[in-house]
C-alpha cells in the first residue's frame, strides 16, 4: 500500500518509482484532483523521465473517471503547464521530479489560472481523498485529447519581453538532458542567437550530470563551454526547466539575487512604482535597488507558495528567490526560468558591453551561499545563536523565517529544514573579512564548537 504521508510534500508529490509512486497512486491522485477542483477539464504535461508518460496517462484515467476531460499536453516544462493552465483556464498537473535523481518522480499541481496547490491550499485535503479512494462518478467518462502547447507557449513568452533589435548573441545552454532541450529551440526560434547546446537529448537517466544547477558541480561543463566557445552568456536549466541559472562570459556563475535585481529594474521601467517581491535570503542589494528605482520592495518567507500568495495580495509585478525561481505577474504570478532568461538576453543584447559589466552594478555584497549543518536539536542550536548575538550594539533580529540577525554591513539567516535535521545558514556582508568572521562565529555556535 502506498505511503501517501511520505510522498505528499509541502508543495507537491514526490517519491521513488515504483515503490513509493506508481501508476495506481497517480490514478488515485488524478481522481481526487478532479473531484477536489470540480473541473470539467484538466491539462497534463510530463517531463522526459521513463516513468513520466505512464504516470501522466494513469493520472488522466483518474481524472476521466470523474467525468472530466483530459487535455494531454505531452512533453513539456513546468512553466509550460502554467502557461496551459493560465491560458486555457483549467487546473493542471505536471509529472516531474524536477532536479531529483532518476529514481524519483512526482506530481506538481495547480488550479485554474496557474494558482498554486500546496499543503495549506488543497494538497492536504487531496492526500486524504486519494488515500481513501475516490469512486468513479456516475455518467460518462471524460475524454482524452492531445493539445499542442509548445508553439503557443514560446510565442506568449516573447510577447512579455521585447527582444526586437537585440544584437547577435552566442548563447551556451546546458539543458542537463531535461526539458529545456525540448523548449529552448522553439523559444529561440527567429532570434539572432547562435546556440551552443549541451545535453539537449531528453534522457531521464541524466547520463552527464544531475539536472540541478544550484549545485556548482553541475554547472562546470557549461562554464567550460562558455569560455571555450567565446559565448556571451551561459544558461543552465533544471530537469523540468522552471529554474534558470546564468554564467557570464568569463564562466563565472551569476547570483540569482543579481538576476532578481536586474529583472526588477527592467519591470520597474515598464511599470514605475510597482511592487517587487524578494525572499529574505536574497541579497540586501535587491530592496536597495528596487527602492532606488522607485519600486516598493516586499520581503517574504522562503518558498514559492509564500511568494505567489504575497504577489497576488500585493499585485506585485515580479518576484525573485535565491534558488533561481523567478515569478511574473503577467505569467499568472507563476515562475518561469525561460522568461527570466529572455529578460537577461534582452538586457544583454540591447547594449554593447559584456554581461559581467552589465551586472556589476547589481552585485554589491559578498555572500556565503547556503551552508548546511546537521544538528540534533534545531531549536536549541538556534537559541544559542540568538543568545550570543542578543544585546550586541546595533544588532536587530526578526523571526519571519527562522532567525535573521543584522547589524550595519552584515546579516545572516538561520533556518531549519522542514524535512531533515539541518540548519541552513546564509550570510551576507560588505566585505570578505566580515563575511568570514560572522560565518565562522555562527557555525561554531551551531555545531557546538563555541568556547
Image: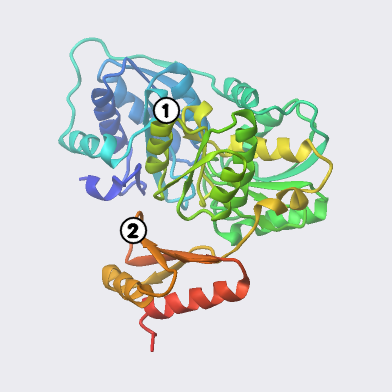
Image: 221 above or below 55 = below
Task: Specify the color scheme.
Answer: rainbow
Residue drawn at (36%, 66%), measured in percent from left and top? 422
| Residue 251: mark in rendering | none
- Residue 423 in the image: above or below residue 269: below
Q: Residue at x 43, y 35 (%)?
A: 311
- Residue 237 lies, in percent from the top left, at 59, 45
In this view, which residue lies farthest toward the front?
Answer: 393
Pair 1/2: label in front: 2
Q: Residue at x 29, y 45 (%)?
A: 8
**Where 177 sits versus 308, above or below?**
below
Label located before the other in sequence (1 or 2): 1
Quickly name the residue at label 2.
399
How many labels were placed on the picture? 2
**Other-residue count near label 2 (Cα within 10 Å), few / some / many at <14 / 14–19 / ≥20:** few
The one of 435 and 98 positioned closer to us in this rendering? 435
Observer able to see residue 30: yes
Q: Quadrant of the C terminus?
A: bottom left
In the image, 374: left or right of 426? left
Nearest to the observer: residue 166 or residue 263: 263
Label 1 belongs to which residue? 114
Residue 426 in view of the camera: no
Which is more toward the observer, 426 or 226?
426
Q: Is residue 69 left or right of residue 50?
A: left
Quadrant location, the N terminus: top left
Secondary structure found at label 1: helix
Name the spot of residue 350 as percent of width and height, x first. Answer: 78, 35
Amino acid at each position: 500500500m502506498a505511503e501517501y504521508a511520505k510522498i505528499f510534500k509541502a508543495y507537491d508529490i514526490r517519491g521513488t518509482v515504483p515503490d513509493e509512486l506508481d501508476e495506481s497512486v497517480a490514478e488515485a491522485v488524478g481522481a481526487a484532483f478532479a473531484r477536489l477542483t470540480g473541473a470539467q477539464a484538466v491539462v497534463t504535461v510530463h517531463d522526459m523521465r521513463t516513468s513520466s508518460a505512464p504516470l501522466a496517462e494513469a493520472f488522466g484515467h483518474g481524472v476521466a473517471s470523474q467525468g472530466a476531460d483530459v487535455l494531454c499536453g505531452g512533453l513539456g516544462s513546468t512553466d509550460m503547464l502554467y502557461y496551459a493552465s493560465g491560458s486555457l483556464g483549467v487546473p493542471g498537473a505536471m509529472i516531474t521530479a524536477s532536479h531529483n535523481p532518476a529514481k524519483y518522480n512526482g506530481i506538481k499541481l495547480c488550479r485554474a489560472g496557474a494558482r498554486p496547490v500546496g499543503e495549506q491550499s488543497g494538497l492536504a485535503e487531496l492526500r486524504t481523498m486519494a488515500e481513501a479512494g475516490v469512486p468513479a462518478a456516475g455518467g460518462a467518462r471524460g475524454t482524452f485529447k492531445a493539445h499542442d502547447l509548445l508553439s503557443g507557449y514560446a510565442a506568449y513568452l516573447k510577447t512579455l519581453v521585447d527582444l526586437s533589435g537585440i544584437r547577435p548573441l552566442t548563447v551556451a545552454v546546458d539543458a542537463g538532458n531535461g526539458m529545456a532541450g525540448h523548449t529552448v529551440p522553439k523559444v529561440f526560434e527567429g532570434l539572432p542567437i547562435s546556440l551552443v547546446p549541451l545535453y539537449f537529448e531528453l534522457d531521464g537517466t541524466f547520463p552527464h550530470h544531475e539536472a540541478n544547477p544550484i549545485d556548482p558541480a553541475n554547472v562546470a561543463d557549461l562554464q567550460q563551454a562558455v569560455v571555450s566557445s567565446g559565448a556571451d552568456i551561459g544558461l543552465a536549466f533544471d530537469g523540468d526547466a522552471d529554474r534558470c541559472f546564468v554564467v557570464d562570459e568569463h564562466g563565472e556563475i551569476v547570483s540569482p539575487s543579481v538576476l532578481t535585481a536586474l529583472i526588477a529594474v527592467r519591470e520597474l521601467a515598464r511599470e514605475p512604482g510597482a511592487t517587487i517581491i524578494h525572499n529574505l535570503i536574497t541579497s540586501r542589494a535587491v530592496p536597495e535597488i528596487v527602492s532606488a528605482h522607485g519600486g516598493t520592495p516586499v520581503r517574504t518567507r522562503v518558498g514559492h507558495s509564500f511568494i505567489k500568495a504575497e504577489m497576488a495580495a500585493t499585485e506585485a509585478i515580479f518576484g525573485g528567490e535565491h534558488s533561481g525561481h523567478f515569478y511574473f505577474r503577467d505569467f499568472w504570478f507563476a515562475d518561469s526560468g525561460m522568461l527570466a532568461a529572455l529578460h537577461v538576453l534582452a538586457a544583454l543584447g540591447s547594449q554593447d558591453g559584456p554581461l559581467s559589466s552589465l551586472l556589476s552594478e547589481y552585485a554589491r555584497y559578498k555572500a556565503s551561499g547556503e551552508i548546511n549543518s546537521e544538528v540534533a536539536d534545531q531549536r536549541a542550536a538556534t537559541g544559542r545563536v540568538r543568545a550570543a548575538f542578543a544585546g550586541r550594539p546595533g544588532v536587530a533580529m526578526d523571526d519571519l523565517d527562522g532567525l535573521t540577525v543584522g547589524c550595519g554591513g552584515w546579516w545572516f539567516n538561520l533556518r531549519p529544514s522542514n524535512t531533515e535535521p539541518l540548519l541552513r545558514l546564509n550570510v551576507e556582508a560588505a566585505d570578505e573579512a566580515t563575511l568570514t568572521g560572522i560565518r565562522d562565529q555562527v557555525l561554531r555556535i551551531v555545531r557546538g564548537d563555541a568556547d
